[in-house]
Image (cartoon, helix red, strand yellow):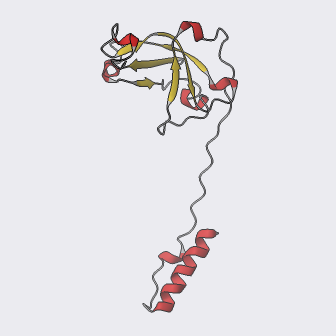
Amino acid sequence: LQDGEVYVAVNYPPTHPAYKKFPEPHVITGTVVVAKCPALHPGDLRKFRAVHHDQRSPHLAELKDVIVFPQRGDRDAPNMLSGSDLDGDQYFVCWDERLLPTATNYEAAEFYKPKPKPKAAMPVASRRYEGNTMTDKKKQLTDFFVNYIK
């Protein structure tokens, strides 16, 4: 997929009116709007071009009830959607032309991942204590909690 493109495949349940027209999984094409809740910033709602799979990506045909984002672009598309990180997020996808905004995408908000804390030296609790007495075990446990809180 190219920058600005997504792949969307849906399965309509038998009770849905569109099921009669699309009893098999249906690939959405054309302009779509995608958001991830909560969408608090105008840039959290993004317009994409939904495309059908082709010879370059036949593996997409196997995917159902899914949205696939491109790996290309200056910034990953999910992060522009409320800082999504693909850890089980669910997305709202709309392809109803009556509901699509006419404006172009707003500038996406900046979302930063927190920097991981530097790993501390090996905690005292992991050091081997010579004795096996209750006092040694209490000391080991106390040292562990003190170093953990630091």
The image position of residue 126, as x and y in percent, is 48, 75
Task: Please tell me which residue is depicted at 48% across the width and 78% down the height of the picture.
Answer: 127
Image quarter of the C terminus: bottom right
The image position of residue 115, as x and y in percent, is 62, 49
In this view, 87 is above or below 144: above
Task: Please tell me which residue is depicted at 61% across the width and 75% down the height of the picture.
Answer: 146
Q: Is residue 7 left or right of residue 31?
A: left
The image position of residue 69, as x and y in percent, is 48, 24
Image quarter of the N terminus: top left
The image position of residue 149, as x and y in percent, is 62, 69
Along the viewing direction, whichever of 56 and 132 lies nearer the viewer: 132
Along the viewing direction, whichever of 94 and 110 lies nearer the viewer: 94
Task: Please tell me which residue is depicted at 48% across the width and 39% down the height of the picture.
Answer: 87
In this view, 81 is above or below 87: above
Tally of numbered tags: 0
Residue 107 visible in this rendered orientation of the protein: yes
Task: Please tell me which residue is depicted at 65% across the width and 8% down the height of the picture.
Answer: 102
